[in-house]
Image (cartoon, rainbow, N blue to C red):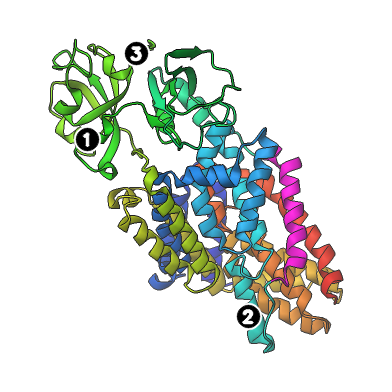
């Protein structure tokens, strides 16, 4: 081995050790590895930065804007309701999640599917009372399994098919050629996660524990408008029974007050639902489709709704409205802000918001223009004002436009009229143009740490390829197989999985394809079993966050560590490998 090869192997070991045993942020580890490869001369500047110009990485970044438009219009809630529904328990939740995601990933690139569904799954997890850390890995695994079912399911399949056409001069594989092995693998993988694999998933401290640390309880009234989709449903069916951090206190219906609300209570038009809960949960409630804040003051704010945000403000002794009701004191006219709820030292305030007499120390949940916090910064009317990060009023009227833009993006990319990047760029532009999201929120919602991790990971794969380390390891292992085609197929599969877990899937199949061809020629047997094995193994990245972009994408939202992927992924790798190696020779023959 030369100096560059030794340096590359050493850096790879350092990366793996850091991710497994040291709690260092993933983006710091990957950028550090890229820097070392650059400073030691293993990679040139162009090689080290190749990931930052990769269309897949840019596509992920652009899709954050599309997701922002869906989130701010309530489109995410629509996806949750239509695609995921309601789950009775954790097993049912994983099944409801993995089936549709694997189906979508069969015909769409896995990365945008996961990018769009991460916020939807986070919102869904709150509604069904399941920690996000129990669902994010199944989300990624479902997209990976779905990608093995068709030729266009993942870029890895397309790369292998292109190499196969170049090698043989044939027309290549059909759209559903790989389905014969991909479908059994997907069924086996989903069954494993539902029946036993979920037991290996971590239960990270998440929203369920966080909300209990906040003692500010707001009382907020929500109205059921005419033509709401909740009308005629029971409280249980509408998903209002077991909301995390907030509970339904009473229903006001004409001249009747219903307390201790039954889950079988039927929701009627113009019902006033009174909830008590913590600030983050109340903000989520304000975004729920089919409910509106029970006030007519929001329509009288002077700024357009897309410039609004949620804030909290603590009333001071100098506030001119203190000692008066919110309505009598003209709070909206004075501050161009609407009080949505009031918290008072854990006390439950059983009054309409406009009739509440404000006291010193009351904490107000406000909807106001984005500059309210700046305008009141030096005011003595409030002890403290703070903008709630990442929260803005949902513009449900734009939901149809946002979902239509999403559908158009999927159709254009799925039919190959546009590339995934081109379709995503068009969709993000339309989201901003039609005011499904503002330019400021679009910028703020891009998760740069995820993009940096993915882009930096390319440099490590490039180093293993460029120094020849990957090929040396592969050929050394194949020499052990002798003339047995089954063992040779197993080794080709295992080598591809190993490289997929360490240097990304696309780099892995490019490295192992010529090895697969050489092995087939040496054994004088059919090439197809080895090509299919490379395809499946190139997507079977379950044990590491490095091998596949979707694993990296869910790492932050799920609060995962490297070891979390190992615990579940090793079993998944063995299972999919057994299914693939057992069936491939019978389907295509040596």
- Residue range in magenta is 176-200
* SS category of the residue bearing label 3: loop
Q: Earlier in the sequence, mark 1 or mark 2?
A: 2
Residue contact at pointers 1 and 2, CB within 8 angstroms = no
Q: Give the mark toward the camera: 3 or 2.
A: 3
Question: How many numbered discs, if any?
Answer: 3
In percent of width and height, residue 49 lies at: 41, 67
In the rendered image, which residue does mark 1 sit on?
301
Which residue sits at x=39%, y=32%?
Answer: 292
Q: Is residue 262 left or right of residue 228?
A: right
Q: Is residue 199 magenta?
A: yes
Say if mark 3 contacts mark 2, CB within 8 Å. Answer: no
Position of the C terminus, as image quadrant, is: bottom right
Separation of residues labelled 3 and 2 (CA atoms): 70 Å
Q: Dot 1: within a 10 Å radius of its alpha carbon, few (fewer than 14), some, or many (20 or more) residues?
A: some
Q: Which residue is mark 3?
A: 351
- Residue drawn where x is 81% and y is 64% of the image: 581
Say which of marks 1 and 2 sits in front.
1
Q: Main secondary structure of the magenta part?
A: helix
How many other residues sit within 10 Å of disc 3, few (<14), some (14-19) or many (≥20)?
A: few
Q: Which residue, given by chain and number where applicable, does mark 2 sit on? A: 163
Residue 317 lies in the magenta stretch: no
Mark 3 or mark 1: whose residue is earlier in sequence: 1
Q: Secondary structure at mark 2?
A: helix
Instruction: Give the quarter of the image for residue 451.
Output: bottom left
Residue 235 on image: x %, y %: 56, 26
Viewer-proximal residue among 337 and 61? 337
Q: Nearer the viewer, residue 101 or 507?
A: 101
Q: Is residue 246 above or below residue 229?
A: above
Q: Secondary structure at mark 1?
A: loop
Residue drawn at (72%, 56%), measured in percent from left and top?
A: 186
């Amino acid at each position: 081995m030369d100096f560059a090869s030794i340096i590359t192997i050493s850096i790879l070991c350092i990366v793996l050790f850091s991710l497994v045993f040291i709690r260092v942020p993933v983006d710091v580890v990957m950028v550090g590895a890229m820097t070392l490869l650059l400073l030691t001369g293993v990679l040139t500047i162009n090689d080290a930065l190749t990931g930052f110009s990769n269309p897949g990485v840019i596509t992920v970044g652009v899709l954050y804007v599309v997701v922002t438009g869906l989130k701010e219009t309530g489109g995410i809630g629509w996806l949750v309701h239509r695609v995921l529904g309601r789950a009775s328990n954790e097993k049912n939740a994983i099944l409801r999640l993995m089936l549709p995601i694997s189906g979508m990933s069969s015909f769409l690139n896995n990365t945008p599917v996961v990018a769009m569904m991460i916020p939807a799954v986070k919102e869904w997890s709150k509604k069904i009372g399941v920690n996000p850390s129990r669902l994010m890995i199944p989300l990624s695994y479902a997209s990976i399994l779905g990608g093995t079912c068709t030729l266009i399911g993942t870029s890895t399949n397309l790369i292998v098919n292109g190499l196969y056409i170049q090698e043989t001069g044939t027309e290549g594989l059909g759209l559903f050629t790989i389905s014969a092995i991909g479908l059994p693998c997907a069924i086996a993988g989903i069954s494993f996660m539902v029946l036993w694999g979920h037991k290996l998933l971590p239960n990270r401290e998440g929203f369920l524990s966080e909300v209990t640390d906040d003692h500010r309880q707001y009382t907020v009234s929500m109205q059921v408008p005419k033509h709401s989709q909740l009308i005629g449903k029971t409280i249980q069916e509408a998903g209002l029974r077991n909301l995390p951090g907030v509970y339904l206190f009473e229903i006001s219906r004409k001249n009747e007050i219903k307390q201790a609300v039954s889950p079988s209570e039927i929701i009627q038009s113009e019902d006033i639902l009174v909830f008590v809960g913590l600030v983050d949960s109340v903000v989520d409630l304000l975004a729920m489709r089919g409910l509106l804040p029970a006030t007519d003051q929001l329509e009288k704010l002077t700024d357009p709704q897309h410039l609004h945000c949620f804030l909290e403000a603590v009333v001071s002794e100098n506030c001119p409205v203190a000692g008066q009701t919110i309505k009598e004191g003209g709070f909206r006219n004075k501050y161009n802000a609407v009080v949505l709820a009031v918290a008072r030292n854990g006390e439950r305030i059983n009054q309409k918001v406009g009739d509440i007499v404000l006291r010193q120390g009351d904490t107000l949940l406000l909807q106001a223009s984005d500059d309210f916090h700046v305008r009141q910064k030096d005011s003595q009317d409030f002890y403290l004002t703070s903008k709630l990060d990442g929260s803005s009023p949902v513009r449900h009227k734009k939901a149809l436009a946002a979902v239509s833009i999403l559908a158009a993006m999927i159709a254009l990319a799925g039919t190959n009229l546009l590339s995934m990047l081109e379709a995503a760029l068009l969709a993000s532009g339309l989201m901003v143009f039609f005011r499904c999201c503002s330019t400021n929120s679009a910028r703020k919602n891009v998760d740069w740490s995820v993009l940096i991790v993915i882009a930096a990971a390319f440099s490590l794969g490039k180093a293993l390829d460029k120094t020849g380390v990957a090929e040396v390891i592969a050929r050394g292992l194949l020499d052990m197989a002798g003339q047995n085609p089954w063992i040779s197929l197993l080794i080709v599969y295992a080598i591809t999985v190993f490289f997929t877990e360490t240097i990304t899937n696309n780099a892995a199949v490019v490295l192992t394809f010529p090895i697969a061809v050489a092995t087939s020629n040496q054994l004088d047997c059919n090439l197809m079993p080895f090509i299919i094995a490379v395809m499946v193994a190139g997507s079977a990245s379950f044990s590491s966050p490095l091998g596949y972009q979707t694993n990296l994408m869910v790492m932050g939202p799920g609060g995962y560590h490297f070891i979390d992927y190992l615990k579940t992924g090793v079993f998944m790798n063995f299972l999919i490998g057994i299914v693939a190696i057992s069936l491939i020779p019978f389907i295509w023959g040596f």
